[in-house]
Amino acid sequence: MEGVVDLEAVLDKLSGAVFDDASVAELLDVQTVLERVYRRVPAIQHRVMAAVKAHASPGDLGARSWRDALGIRLRLSPQEAGRRLAEGELLAPRRAVTGQPLAPVYPGTSAAQARGEITAEHVRIITTTMKKIPFAVDEPTRADAEARLAGYASAHDPDTLRALAKHLLAVLDPDGPEPSDDEDVERVEERRTFVLGPQDEHGNSEFHGTLTAQGRAYLEPVLGKLAGPGMCNPADESPCTKGTPSQEAIDTDTRTRGQRQHDALITVAREALMSGEWGEHNGLPVTVVLGATVADFDAATGHAVTAAGSRVPMREVIRLASHSLLCLAVFDEVTGRPLHFGRTRRCASADQRLVLTYRDRGCTFPGCRVPAYGCQTHHAVQDFAQGGATDIDQLVLACGPHNRLVKDGGWTTALTTTGSVEWIPPPLLDTGQARTNLYHHPEQILGDGPPGQAQDTSG
Protein backbone atom coordinates (compact mmCIF):
# COMPACT_ATOMS: atom_id res chain seq x y z
CA MET A 1 0.00 0.00 0.00
CA GLU A 2 1.18 3.52 -0.82
CA GLY A 3 1.20 4.80 2.77
CA VAL A 4 3.28 1.86 4.00
CA VAL A 5 5.76 2.31 1.15
CA ASP A 6 6.07 6.01 2.06
CA LEU A 7 6.65 5.09 5.70
CA GLU A 8 9.45 2.70 4.80
CA ALA A 9 11.02 5.35 2.57
CA VAL A 10 11.01 7.85 5.45
CA LEU A 11 12.56 5.28 7.78
CA ASP A 12 15.25 4.50 5.21
CA LYS A 13 16.04 8.21 5.02
CA LEU A 14 16.16 8.60 8.80
CA SER A 15 18.34 5.50 9.18
CA GLY A 16 21.08 7.26 7.24
CA ALA A 17 20.68 10.61 8.96
CA VAL A 18 23.57 12.09 10.97
CA PHE A 19 22.67 13.84 14.25
CA ASP A 20 26.15 14.98 15.31
CA ASP A 21 25.52 18.66 14.59
CA ALA A 22 22.09 18.85 16.23
CA SER A 23 21.61 20.58 19.56
CA VAL A 24 20.45 18.72 22.65
CA ALA A 25 17.02 20.38 22.40
CA GLU A 26 16.69 19.30 18.76
CA LEU A 27 17.78 15.74 19.58
CA LEU A 28 15.22 15.52 22.37
CA ASP A 29 12.52 16.78 20.00
CA VAL A 30 13.49 14.04 17.53
CA GLN A 31 13.38 11.45 20.29
CA THR A 32 9.92 12.63 21.33
CA VAL A 33 8.57 12.36 17.78
CA LEU A 34 10.09 8.90 17.32
CA GLU A 35 8.57 7.76 20.61
CA ARG A 36 5.14 9.04 19.57
CA VAL A 37 5.40 7.20 16.24
CA TYR A 38 6.57 4.04 18.02
CA ARG A 39 3.52 4.21 20.31
CA ARG A 40 1.09 4.78 17.41
CA VAL A 41 2.22 1.84 15.28
CA PRO A 42 0.44 -0.84 17.40
CA ALA A 43 -2.90 0.91 16.81
CA ILE A 44 -2.40 0.52 13.06
CA GLN A 45 -1.28 -3.09 13.49
CA HIS A 46 -4.46 -3.87 15.43
CA ARG A 47 -6.59 -2.50 12.56
CA VAL A 48 -4.60 -4.41 9.95
CA MET A 49 -4.96 -7.67 11.88
CA ALA A 50 -8.69 -7.10 12.33
CA ALA A 51 -9.01 -6.73 8.55
CA VAL A 52 -6.97 -9.91 7.96
CA LYS A 53 -9.19 -11.88 10.35
CA ALA A 54 -12.29 -10.58 8.55
CA HIS A 55 -11.11 -12.07 5.25
CA ALA A 56 -9.42 -15.34 6.22
CA SER A 57 -8.96 -18.03 8.86
CA PRO A 58 -5.68 -19.36 10.27
CA GLY A 59 -6.17 -22.56 8.29
CA ASP A 60 -6.36 -20.58 5.05
CA LEU A 61 -2.82 -19.40 5.75
CA GLY A 62 -1.56 -22.86 6.72
CA ALA A 63 -1.35 -22.18 10.47
CA ARG A 64 -2.94 -23.81 13.51
CA SER A 65 -4.09 -20.51 15.05
CA TRP A 66 -3.80 -16.76 14.59
CA ARG A 67 -1.07 -16.75 17.22
CA ASP A 68 0.95 -19.22 15.15
CA ALA A 69 0.26 -17.33 11.92
CA LEU A 70 1.44 -14.05 13.42
CA GLY A 71 4.43 -15.70 15.09
CA ILE A 72 5.60 -17.41 11.90
CA ARG A 73 5.05 -14.44 9.61
CA LEU A 74 6.69 -11.88 11.93
CA ARG A 75 9.04 -14.24 13.83
CA LEU A 76 7.43 -13.45 17.19
CA SER A 77 7.46 -15.60 20.31
CA PRO A 78 4.13 -17.29 21.10
CA GLN A 79 3.76 -15.02 24.13
CA GLU A 80 4.31 -11.81 22.16
CA ALA A 81 2.01 -12.91 19.34
CA GLY A 82 -0.69 -13.82 21.87
CA ARG A 83 -0.31 -10.49 23.65
CA ARG A 84 -0.71 -8.51 20.44
CA LEU A 85 -3.77 -10.48 19.39
CA ALA A 86 -5.40 -10.12 22.81
CA GLU A 87 -4.84 -6.37 22.82
CA GLY A 88 -6.10 -6.11 19.26
CA GLU A 89 -9.38 -7.75 20.29
CA LEU A 90 -9.89 -4.97 22.82
CA LEU A 91 -8.47 -1.94 20.99
CA ALA A 92 -9.25 -2.46 17.29
CA PRO A 93 -12.53 -1.27 15.70
CA ARG A 94 -15.12 -4.03 15.45
CA ARG A 95 -18.08 -4.98 13.31
CA ALA A 96 -21.42 -6.36 14.37
CA VAL A 97 -22.78 -9.58 12.88
CA THR A 98 -24.82 -7.41 10.54
CA GLY A 99 -21.66 -5.62 9.36
CA GLN A 100 -22.34 -2.43 11.27
CA PRO A 101 -19.11 -0.77 12.51
CA LEU A 102 -18.65 -0.76 16.28
CA ALA A 103 -16.28 1.11 18.55
CA PRO A 104 -13.42 -0.82 20.21
CA VAL A 105 -14.15 -2.57 23.49
CA TYR A 106 -11.93 0.03 25.21
CA PRO A 107 -12.44 3.17 23.09
CA GLY A 108 -10.58 5.60 25.36
CA THR A 109 -7.47 3.45 25.46
CA SER A 110 -7.65 2.81 21.72
CA ALA A 111 -7.84 6.53 20.97
CA ALA A 112 -4.97 7.36 23.34
CA GLN A 113 -2.82 4.69 21.71
CA ALA A 114 -3.67 5.99 18.22
CA ARG A 115 -2.53 9.46 19.31
CA GLY A 116 0.75 8.06 20.63
CA GLU A 117 0.06 9.19 24.19
CA ILE A 118 0.42 5.84 25.98
CA THR A 119 2.94 3.01 25.99
CA ALA A 120 2.48 -0.75 25.83
CA GLU A 121 2.94 -0.85 29.61
CA HIS A 122 0.08 1.63 30.07
CA VAL A 123 -2.12 -0.60 27.90
CA ARG A 124 -1.31 -3.71 29.96
CA ILE A 125 -2.15 -1.91 33.21
CA ILE A 126 -5.50 -0.71 31.85
CA THR A 127 -6.57 -4.08 30.39
CA THR A 128 -5.53 -5.92 33.56
CA THR A 129 -7.43 -3.46 35.75
CA MET A 130 -10.58 -3.68 33.63
CA LYS A 131 -10.60 -7.48 34.00
CA LYS A 132 -10.60 -7.09 37.79
CA ILE A 133 -13.71 -4.90 37.90
CA PRO A 134 -16.55 -7.04 39.33
CA PHE A 135 -19.27 -8.22 36.95
CA ALA A 136 -21.84 -6.58 39.23
CA VAL A 137 -20.62 -3.13 38.19
CA ASP A 138 -22.98 -1.73 35.51
CA GLU A 139 -21.82 -0.98 31.97
CA PRO A 140 -21.90 2.86 32.19
CA THR A 141 -19.70 2.74 35.29
CA ARG A 142 -17.29 0.33 33.59
CA ALA A 143 -17.11 2.59 30.53
CA ASP A 144 -16.43 5.59 32.75
CA ALA A 145 -13.67 3.66 34.52
CA GLU A 146 -12.00 2.80 31.21
CA ALA A 147 -12.17 6.41 30.07
CA ARG A 148 -10.68 7.58 33.38
CA LEU A 149 -7.84 5.07 33.14
CA ALA A 150 -7.08 6.16 29.57
CA GLY A 151 -7.05 9.78 30.72
CA TYR A 152 -4.75 8.95 33.63
CA ALA A 153 -2.42 7.04 31.29
CA SER A 154 -2.17 9.99 28.91
CA ALA A 155 -0.91 12.23 31.70
CA HIS A 156 1.06 9.93 34.01
CA ASP A 157 3.86 7.36 33.92
CA PRO A 158 3.02 3.63 34.30
CA ASP A 159 3.91 3.45 38.01
CA THR A 160 1.58 6.33 38.84
CA LEU A 161 -1.14 4.84 36.64
CA ARG A 162 -0.77 1.54 38.50
CA ALA A 163 -1.39 3.28 41.82
CA LEU A 164 -4.37 5.21 40.42
CA ALA A 165 -5.81 2.02 38.95
CA LYS A 166 -5.51 0.28 42.31
CA HIS A 167 -7.38 3.16 43.96
CA LEU A 168 -10.08 3.06 41.29
CA LEU A 169 -10.63 -0.65 41.92
CA ALA A 170 -10.93 0.02 45.64
CA VAL A 171 -13.62 2.65 44.95
CA LEU A 172 -15.59 0.37 42.62
CA ASP A 173 -15.33 -2.65 44.90
CA PRO A 174 -14.66 -1.41 48.46
CA ASP A 175 -15.58 -4.72 50.12
CA GLY A 176 -13.59 -6.88 47.74
CA PRO A 177 -14.92 -10.03 46.06
CA GLU A 178 -17.29 -12.30 47.96
CA PRO A 179 -16.98 -15.68 46.27
CA SER A 180 -19.09 -18.64 47.20
CA ASP A 181 -17.45 -21.70 48.68
CA ASP A 182 -17.28 -23.34 45.25
CA GLU A 183 -15.79 -20.24 43.66
CA ASP A 184 -13.27 -19.93 46.46
CA VAL A 185 -12.15 -23.55 46.05
CA GLU A 186 -11.91 -23.14 42.29
CA ARG A 187 -9.77 -20.03 42.67
CA VAL A 188 -7.42 -21.83 45.07
CA GLU A 189 -7.16 -24.83 42.73
CA GLU A 190 -6.28 -22.59 39.79
CA ARG A 191 -3.17 -21.40 41.64
CA ARG A 192 -1.59 -24.86 41.61
CA THR A 193 1.56 -24.93 39.50
CA PHE A 194 4.96 -26.50 39.13
CA VAL A 195 7.46 -24.90 36.76
CA LEU A 196 10.86 -26.41 36.01
CA GLY A 197 13.23 -23.68 34.87
CA PRO A 198 16.03 -23.85 32.30
CA GLN A 199 19.44 -25.32 33.08
CA ASP A 200 22.35 -23.09 34.05
CA GLU A 201 25.94 -23.56 32.89
CA HIS A 202 26.42 -26.33 35.48
CA GLY A 203 23.31 -28.26 34.44
CA ASN A 204 21.35 -27.27 37.55
CA SER A 205 17.74 -26.06 37.28
CA GLU A 206 15.61 -23.88 39.52
CA PHE A 207 11.92 -24.62 39.94
CA HIS A 208 9.02 -22.90 41.62
CA GLY A 209 5.39 -23.71 42.20
CA THR A 210 2.35 -23.69 44.44
CA LEU A 211 1.02 -26.89 46.03
CA THR A 212 -2.64 -27.44 46.78
CA ALA A 213 -3.58 -28.73 50.23
CA GLN A 214 -4.03 -32.20 48.71
CA GLY A 215 -0.59 -32.08 47.09
CA ARG A 216 1.03 -31.05 50.34
CA ALA A 217 -0.78 -33.81 52.20
CA TYR A 218 0.71 -36.38 49.81
CA LEU A 219 4.20 -34.90 49.86
CA GLU A 220 4.59 -34.40 53.61
CA PRO A 221 4.80 -38.09 54.60
CA VAL A 222 7.08 -38.83 51.63
CA LEU A 223 9.53 -36.12 52.68
CA GLY A 224 9.08 -36.98 56.32
CA LYS A 225 10.39 -40.48 55.60
CA LEU A 226 12.84 -40.12 52.68
CA ALA A 227 14.25 -36.68 53.58
CA GLY A 228 15.18 -37.66 57.12
CA PRO A 229 18.84 -37.65 58.22
CA GLY A 230 20.68 -40.66 56.80
CA MET A 231 18.05 -41.41 54.12
CA CYS A 232 18.73 -41.36 50.34
CA ASN A 233 22.20 -39.89 50.83
CA PRO A 234 24.13 -40.06 47.52
CA ALA A 235 27.40 -39.76 49.48
CA ASP A 236 26.81 -43.19 51.02
CA GLU A 237 28.16 -46.24 49.20
CA SER A 238 24.76 -47.92 49.54
CA PRO A 239 22.16 -45.19 50.24
CA CYS A 240 19.31 -46.23 52.52
CA THR A 241 15.99 -45.84 50.68
CA LYS A 242 13.86 -48.25 52.72
CA GLY A 243 13.58 -49.07 56.38
CA THR A 244 15.63 -47.16 58.95
CA PRO A 245 19.14 -45.84 58.33
CA SER A 246 21.98 -46.84 60.63
CA GLN A 247 23.07 -44.52 63.38
CA GLU A 248 26.37 -44.06 61.57
CA ALA A 249 24.54 -42.93 58.40
CA ILE A 250 22.57 -40.44 60.48
CA ASP A 251 25.60 -39.10 62.35
CA THR A 252 27.69 -38.62 59.19
CA ASP A 253 24.91 -36.94 57.18
CA THR A 254 26.03 -33.34 56.70
CA ARG A 255 23.36 -32.35 54.13
CA THR A 256 21.05 -29.39 54.67
CA ARG A 257 17.29 -29.90 54.92
CA GLY A 258 16.88 -28.62 51.36
CA GLN A 259 19.51 -31.04 50.05
CA ARG A 260 17.84 -33.97 51.83
CA GLN A 261 14.47 -33.08 50.30
CA HIS A 262 16.06 -32.81 46.86
CA ASP A 263 17.60 -36.28 47.20
CA ALA A 264 14.28 -37.67 48.45
CA LEU A 265 12.41 -36.44 45.37
CA ILE A 266 15.06 -37.96 43.09
CA THR A 267 14.63 -41.29 44.87
CA VAL A 268 10.85 -41.17 44.41
CA ALA A 269 11.18 -40.42 40.69
CA ARG A 270 13.84 -43.08 40.14
CA GLU A 271 11.87 -45.82 41.88
CA ALA A 272 8.71 -44.87 39.97
CA LEU A 273 10.59 -45.23 36.66
CA MET A 274 12.26 -48.47 37.72
CA SER A 275 8.88 -50.02 38.51
CA GLY A 276 8.31 -50.55 34.78
CA GLU A 277 4.60 -49.84 35.19
CA TRP A 278 4.44 -46.66 33.10
CA GLY A 279 4.70 -48.26 29.67
CA GLU A 280 5.44 -45.94 26.74
CA HIS A 281 4.77 -42.33 25.79
CA ASN A 282 4.78 -41.36 22.10
CA GLY A 283 6.70 -44.52 21.27
CA LEU A 284 9.39 -44.01 23.91
CA PRO A 285 9.70 -46.03 27.11
CA VAL A 286 8.93 -43.86 30.11
CA THR A 287 12.45 -43.81 31.45
CA VAL A 288 15.58 -41.70 31.26
CA VAL A 289 16.79 -41.60 27.65
CA LEU A 290 20.32 -40.31 27.06
CA GLY A 291 22.45 -39.87 23.95
CA ALA A 292 26.22 -39.41 23.87
CA THR A 293 29.24 -39.90 21.60
CA VAL A 294 31.62 -42.83 21.92
CA ALA A 295 34.53 -40.50 22.68
CA ASP A 296 32.72 -38.75 25.55
CA PHE A 297 31.51 -42.03 26.99
CA ASP A 298 34.95 -43.65 26.90
CA ALA A 299 36.69 -40.59 28.35
CA ALA A 300 33.94 -39.90 30.90
CA THR A 301 33.91 -36.25 29.79
CA GLY A 302 31.43 -33.97 28.06
CA HIS A 303 27.72 -34.53 28.45
CA ALA A 304 24.76 -36.57 27.26
CA VAL A 305 21.45 -35.14 26.04
CA THR A 306 18.08 -36.35 27.35
CA ALA A 307 14.90 -36.78 25.34
CA ALA A 308 13.70 -33.48 26.80
CA GLY A 309 16.78 -31.67 25.52
CA SER A 310 18.51 -31.19 28.87
CA ARG A 311 22.20 -31.92 29.35
CA VAL A 312 23.65 -34.36 31.85
CA PRO A 313 27.40 -34.33 32.62
CA MET A 314 29.04 -37.67 31.77
CA ARG A 315 29.98 -38.28 35.40
CA GLU A 316 26.25 -38.15 36.22
CA VAL A 317 25.46 -40.44 33.27
CA ILE A 318 27.77 -43.07 34.72
CA ARG A 319 26.08 -42.75 38.11
CA LEU A 320 22.69 -43.10 36.42
CA ALA A 321 23.85 -46.22 34.61
CA SER A 322 24.60 -47.87 37.94
CA HIS A 323 20.84 -47.90 38.62
CA SER A 324 20.08 -49.58 35.26
CA LEU A 325 17.09 -47.42 34.52
CA LEU A 326 18.20 -45.60 31.36
CA CYS A 327 18.44 -46.24 27.64
CA LEU A 328 21.81 -45.05 26.34
CA ALA A 329 22.16 -44.38 22.61
CA VAL A 330 25.81 -44.17 21.55
CA PHE A 331 26.67 -42.75 18.11
CA ASP A 332 29.92 -42.85 16.19
CA GLU A 333 31.65 -39.50 16.62
CA VAL A 334 33.15 -39.46 13.11
CA THR A 335 30.29 -40.48 10.83
CA GLY A 336 27.40 -39.71 13.17
CA ARG A 337 25.20 -42.02 11.08
CA PRO A 338 22.45 -43.87 12.94
CA LEU A 339 21.83 -47.56 12.36
CA HIS A 340 19.35 -48.38 9.59
CA PHE A 341 16.13 -49.70 11.11
CA GLY A 342 13.93 -50.49 8.13
CA ARG A 343 10.26 -51.11 8.86
CA THR A 344 7.27 -52.31 6.89
CA ARG A 345 4.83 -50.83 9.40
CA ARG A 346 3.66 -47.24 9.67
CA CYS A 347 4.77 -46.76 13.26
CA ALA A 348 8.45 -46.45 14.09
CA SER A 349 9.97 -49.04 16.39
CA ALA A 350 11.20 -48.21 19.88
CA ASP A 351 14.77 -48.50 18.59
CA GLN A 352 14.05 -45.98 15.83
CA ARG A 353 12.48 -43.62 18.34
CA LEU A 354 15.61 -43.79 20.48
CA VAL A 355 17.78 -42.94 17.47
CA LEU A 356 15.51 -40.03 16.49
CA THR A 357 15.46 -38.82 20.07
CA TYR A 358 19.21 -38.43 20.14
CA ARG A 359 19.52 -37.09 16.60
CA ASP A 360 16.65 -34.54 16.58
CA ARG A 361 16.15 -33.95 20.34
CA GLY A 362 12.75 -32.41 19.67
CA CYS A 363 10.28 -31.19 17.05
CA THR A 364 12.08 -30.24 13.83
CA PHE A 365 9.55 -27.51 12.91
CA PRO A 366 11.38 -24.14 12.87
CA GLY A 367 11.25 -22.54 16.31
CA CYS A 368 9.20 -25.30 17.96
CA ARG A 369 10.21 -25.89 21.60
CA VAL A 370 8.54 -29.28 22.12
CA PRO A 371 11.16 -31.84 23.24
CA ALA A 372 11.41 -35.42 21.99
CA TYR A 373 9.17 -36.70 24.79
CA GLY A 374 6.25 -34.79 23.26
CA CYS A 375 6.88 -35.67 19.59
CA GLN A 376 5.65 -38.14 17.00
CA THR A 377 7.60 -39.67 14.14
CA HIS A 378 7.02 -37.85 10.86
CA HIS A 379 7.62 -39.29 7.38
CA ALA A 380 9.68 -36.40 6.01
CA VAL A 381 10.09 -37.64 2.42
CA GLN A 382 6.73 -39.17 1.61
CA ASP A 383 3.75 -40.00 3.79
CA PHE A 384 3.35 -43.67 4.64
CA ALA A 385 -0.15 -43.71 3.10
CA GLN A 386 1.41 -42.62 -0.21
CA GLY A 387 4.11 -45.27 -0.23
CA GLY A 388 6.63 -43.68 2.13
CA ALA A 389 9.04 -45.98 3.95
CA THR A 390 9.32 -46.10 7.72
CA ASP A 391 13.12 -46.09 7.56
CA ILE A 392 15.34 -44.19 9.93
CA ASP A 393 16.83 -42.04 7.17
CA GLN A 394 13.35 -40.85 6.15
CA LEU A 395 11.96 -40.16 9.62
CA VAL A 396 12.16 -37.05 11.78
CA LEU A 397 10.52 -35.89 14.98
CA ALA A 398 7.52 -33.53 14.92
CA CYS A 399 4.99 -32.60 17.59
CA GLY A 400 1.40 -33.56 16.84
CA PRO A 401 0.09 -30.10 15.85
CA HIS A 402 2.99 -29.44 13.47
CA ASN A 403 2.86 -32.96 12.08
CA ARG A 404 -0.74 -32.32 11.06
CA LEU A 405 0.20 -29.11 9.20
CA VAL A 406 1.78 -31.21 6.43
CA LYS A 407 -0.96 -31.62 3.83
CA ASP A 408 -1.90 -30.59 0.29
CA GLY A 409 -1.78 -26.81 0.10
CA GLY A 410 -0.10 -26.56 3.50
CA TRP A 411 3.38 -27.17 4.80
CA THR A 412 5.73 -29.66 3.15
CA THR A 413 8.95 -31.25 4.35
CA ALA A 414 12.10 -32.34 2.55
CA LEU A 415 15.36 -33.92 3.59
CA THR A 416 18.60 -32.27 2.52
CA THR A 417 21.66 -34.15 1.29
CA THR A 418 23.16 -33.78 4.77
CA GLY A 419 20.18 -35.45 6.43
CA SER A 420 18.54 -32.42 8.03
CA VAL A 421 14.86 -31.67 7.41
CA GLU A 422 13.49 -28.48 5.94
CA TRP A 423 9.93 -27.27 6.52
CA ILE A 424 8.62 -25.34 3.52
CA PRO A 425 5.78 -22.96 4.43
CA PRO A 426 2.71 -22.26 2.28
CA PRO A 427 2.99 -19.05 0.20
CA LEU A 428 1.15 -16.71 2.57
CA LEU A 429 3.49 -17.57 5.45
CA ASP A 430 6.69 -17.68 3.42
CA THR A 431 8.91 -14.70 4.20
CA GLY A 432 12.20 -16.40 3.46
CA GLN A 433 12.55 -17.43 7.11
CA ALA A 434 14.70 -20.29 8.37
CA ARG A 435 13.42 -23.70 7.34
CA THR A 436 15.32 -25.75 9.90
CA ASN A 437 15.08 -25.79 13.69
CA LEU A 438 18.23 -25.06 15.68
CA TYR A 439 16.44 -24.50 18.99
CA HIS A 440 17.35 -28.01 20.16
CA HIS A 441 20.87 -27.77 18.68
CA PRO A 442 22.37 -24.42 19.70
CA GLU A 443 25.88 -25.86 19.35
CA GLN A 444 25.37 -26.04 15.57
CA ILE A 445 25.45 -22.25 15.37
CA LEU A 446 29.12 -22.51 16.33
CA GLY A 447 29.74 -25.29 13.80
CA ASP A 448 29.97 -28.06 16.39
CA GLY A 449 26.85 -30.05 15.59
CA PRO A 450 25.93 -33.40 17.14
CA PRO A 451 26.19 -36.68 15.27
CA GLY A 452 23.53 -37.27 12.67
CA GLN A 453 22.69 -33.59 12.15
CA ALA A 454 23.71 -31.19 9.45
CA GLN A 455 25.57 -28.10 10.67
CA ASP A 456 23.15 -25.57 9.24
CA THR A 457 23.32 -21.97 10.47
CA SER A 458 20.28 -20.72 8.57
CA GLY A 459 17.98 -20.86 11.57
Image: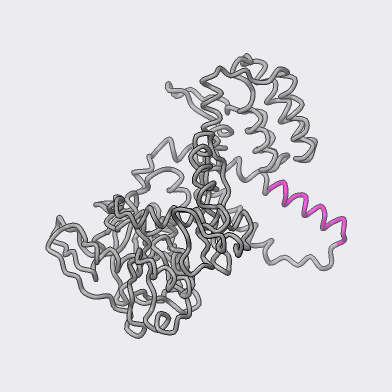
Viewer-closest of 32 and 178: 178
384 drawn magenta:
no
Residue 83 percent location from the top left of the image = 55, 42
Residue 263 percent location from the top left of the image = 52, 58
Residue at the location (51% across, 57% down)?
245
Residue 134, placed above or below residue 278: above
Q: Which colour scheme is used?
A: one colour
Viewer-closest of 64 and 376: 376
**Is 124 on the left or on the right of 444, as rendered?**
right
Viewer-closest of 280 and 403: 280
**Is 54 on the left or on the right of 170, as rendered?**
left
Q: Give the range drawn in magenta.
A: 23-37
Q: Which secondary structure class fits the magenta region best? A: helix
Residue 115 percent location from the top left of the image = 70, 38
Residue at the location (37% across, 75% down)?
454
Viewer-closest of 232 and 207: 232
Residue at the location (49% across, 74% down)?
445
Residue at the location (79% across, 65% down)?
19
**Is 217 on the left or on the right of 452, as rendered?**
right
Q: Quadrant of residue 127?
A: top right
**Is 183 on the left or on the right of 344, as rendered?**
right
Task: Tally the marks.
Answer: 0
Q: In which quarter of the image is the C terminus?
A: bottom left
